[in-house]
Amino acid sequence: MKERIGVYICHCGGNISDYVDVEELGKMFHAEDNVIISKDVMFACADSNQKAMVNDISENHLDAIVVASCSPKLHLHTFKNVASRAGLNPTNYVQVNIREQCSWPHSDKPREATVKAAGLIRAGINRVSHSESLDNIEIQVKRAVLVVGAGVAGMKAAIDLARLGNEVYLVEKDYFVGGRIAQADKLFMSGQKGKDIVAKLYAELKSYKNITLFTGATVEKVSGSLGNFHVDIKIKPRYIHVKADPTTVKKAMDECSIMVDDAFSFALTKRKAIYKNYAEALPDVPVVDIEALKNDTEFLSKYASSFDLTQQDEVLSLYAGSVLVTTGFDSYQPKDGEYGYKTVPNVLTLPEFNSLMELNPEQLVYNNKAIKKIAFIYCVGNRQTKGENKYCSRQCCTSAIYSSIQLKEKYKNITAFHLFRDIRTYGKQEILYEKSSKQGDIYIRWDEKEPPIVEQDGKSINIKVKDHLTSKKELEVEADMVVLVTGMVAREDSQQISEKFKIPIGNDKFFNEIHPKLKPVETVIKGVYIGGSCQGPKNISESVQSSLSAAAKINALLKGGTVSLDPVVARVNNDVCTWCGKCAEVCEYTAIRSIASGDKQIAQVNEAICTGCGICAPVCLVNAIEIAQYTDSEIESMIDGFMQKIEIRDKSSESEEVETTEVLMMKEFPQLWKNILESIDKSKKSIPQLAEELATDKEIITYHLMTMNKYSVVMADGMDEKEAYYYYKRKN
Amino acid sequence: MSNENFKPKILVFSTDKISDPGIDQAGLRKIHYSPSVYVISLPCSSGIKPRWIMRAFEKGFDGVFIAADGHECSYSPKCAEHTNNIILESQTLMKANNISPKRIRMAAICSVCAEPFSGHMDNFSRILFELGDINTEKIKYSKTNNEIKDEPKG
Ligand SMILES: Cc1cc2nc3c(=O)[nH]c(=O)nc-3n(C[C@H](O)[C@H](O)[C@H](O)COP(=O)(O)OP(=O)(O)OC[C@H]3O[C@@H](n4cnc5c(N)ncnc54)[C@H](O)[C@@H]3O)c2cc1C
Ligand code: SF4
Ligand code: SF4
Ligand code: SF4
């Protein structure tokens, strides 16, 4: 129980005291309430008051403080810091919101607002008197990072993390690195080849001794938490003997005559049963397709020294302080018959078409037909008002236009039609749109309600489309090939990854960050970050930006060797708990497990995982689990405090008089008001911004701005990025 | 029917990140609602204990309103289901104490829900006004049954 409490009640320059009798409240709480000091102050947040509070705390040996002022969203940390500076534990501080939740909404009923404020403050005093001094939870963290997925996002992040001195385990599901860009030829905006970028990144990866790359590897099991994740990874065998001579392996590869569909080229070509995704694929060790080769006993015995068919899946255990997931995206796969896909010959998706172009350096030929007229249909599998994928994939417009530009650079006499809904070549990508238009590409705009119809017409394809740019006239386009500009979708196995790491998945099935603007690479799971296109559609530079910012965050987290976490977590009363397991059942984060305690089992909370959500507390039948800072005594004493009887003098007649005189006085705007108005008319400003611009003390700006707000001259308009200050604009 | 001067007291449970900022918005925009509304903010509405709700009724609150996050909850996709279970359990306890189950309500309030919040408060105040002062409800009960049940341990 805290027995030496300090209470500070703020006027907020009139924002509170115009409606709530702050002076009266300042006199209301005494020693019998365990209140040693009670003051009404003009601006509680002002530096001068903060200093006075620090003095009060040490001189009077206060053991807890309450500030009744604005919303805790604004100044909770300000006053927690005051407590810390005075040597008081910040968890012995309670903020009471008598502005946003009292003086402002009840400005029409000042007397009742005062009664309510008294109840709110009483509740705050009760709560703080039950508060505990809690220390932050310190966690030892291992300076090692597991990066899942070696596409461009994962490789770049791995390199950065290694450069900053972290141990990196890079786990790639495929036998070769690079992800989607390894499948691409030339890429916008730089014109570099995807395979060249992969080779460059791989060389850089290999130059770091602190990066261990696992290919053909997947995450099997995850346990532990921030600082010490324990991850089992499964590595599939390549069936190449560890001591095999590379020249013999190469010879075997050349000689292999068994061919299967090549998934890497979207089955446009065949590949051998000993293969690499492409000639320069990395790591430079081929893979044996054991299913395809197993019956060719003669071949297998001829090269027996190169193969090792006894190899099995291998499971390795790794420990990492943090995890970065960069598992990328899949391309939307059209259904059979969607715009003629698989039902009309020569209808391909954009990734298939790009692969076809790469495979045909001289002449574009498909199904033995020279391709001259090509129609691109945009937004396939995306922006479906009624379908599953409501979002736009952002990069496919540019991808299609860039492919069209390359078409004309590479082949002669090509005509390209672009059947689009909207063109979203944002930023510099607009230059490509202009280039395509200038080279004579024909753009036809359709509406989602009337999509183009693709039909076979003898040896050609006929596309009927209503052109919304020329009074919805139905046009017929004849083409040799239709390219479906398919968007990005979440990886097929993203649900499994989500379950392993507990990363939330959005409606669009991509992984969810905490906040797209403020915490764009963090997940609700402490220590688990996401980057690249597994978060949602992104082009290469956007994918790399996000994975590098995750790398920077992770490095900052791990570099000190310890992490300090908020003490608001669940805790179990060991004497009462009977390990019924109900709390563990509802915990979304598997933060609770059972441990032995004496001769019984009880629940134990892993503080590093627990988010303090409190979901476990109401389900316990014996009330054995609670959340620190939200204990029964704290909450119930607040409820009691709201309802305690209070006596307040009725000063309504006096206050009315004061009001009128002030209003009259305020008709003359001081010069500072004019300057403030001039400044905020240009753009909305926060208090610190105004203080800087007008070279005036922050406290003076605060006082005047609050008064201007009080007289409806200005109004708040949103908060700054740190959510510390409101922006203000002129009120019309 | 209530006496004309009766002003129902409402305890609101809000959430730190989503519904409490919505309630702040109502204040910021000077949208009025009853001054007999008191708010306790928690991390998540799924963490409200039925015993806290019963404590509120015992101390004289006429109604309890849960300003939940709905689908926006960042802790659990099942938040609405958990919160609903808490309400059902509380209503069982309330019935056992002859408190009308209508005295508890839930709605999703988001961080910009200023008007909806004040609307809910007006509406709920009207309903509670019709139901009358919780103390008279308790007294009615004690008169007919000659006892008031203990606050249940939740
Ligand atoms: C047709 C097309 C053309 C494009 N052209 C361009 C262009 O010209 N310019 C441009 O900027 N962008 C382009 N893009 C976008 C570009 O492909 C992406 O921005 C980029 O590939 C994203 O990189 P990533 O690392 O996030 O994902 P990915 O490239 O998908 O890499 C993810 C990696 O993770 C691995 N992985 C997946 N699941 C697991 C798992 N469970 N365990 C372990 N590993 C796993 C995958 O095997 C893969 O290697 C194009 C996209 C398409 C569809
Ligand atoms: S980027 Fe273009 S093609 Fe892709 S979904 Fe968006 S509008 Fe459609
Ligand atoms: S619900 Fe309560 S009794 Fe059951 S395991 Fe959890 S803490 Fe123990
Ligand atoms: S507070 Fe939430 S995260 Fe922590 S143990 Fe309880 S349910 Fe799990």
Image (cartoon, coloured by chain):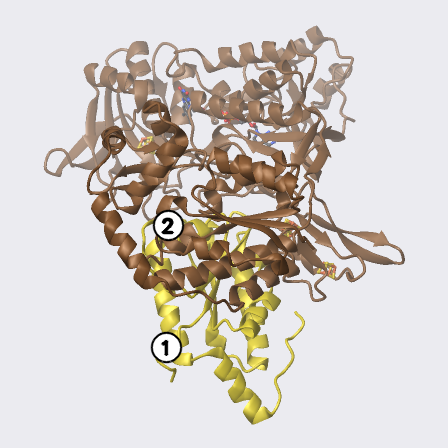
Q: Secondary structure at mark 2?
A: helix
Pick the residue in front: A641 or A716: A641
Q: Amino acid at mark 2?
A: Gln
Q: Is residue A328 left or right of residue A455?
A: right
> Can you give x and y, in whole percent of width and height, for residue A50 in the image?
52, 37
Q: Are marks 1 and 2 on the same chain?
A: yes
Q: Is residue A519 visible?
A: no
In the image, which is nearer the foreground, mark 1 or mark 2? 1
> Can you give x and y, in whole percent of width and height, for residue A12 in the image?
40, 45
Q: Which chain is brown?
A: A
Q: Where on the image, by quarter, is ligand 3?
A: bottom right
Q: Is residue A238 left or right of residue A11?
A: right
> Can you give x and y, in whole percent of width and height, for residue A392 in the image?
35, 35
Q: Which residue is tagged 1?
A: B5
Q: Are marks 1 and 2 in contact (CB under 8 Å)?
A: no
Residue placed at 69% from the left, 16% from the top? A210
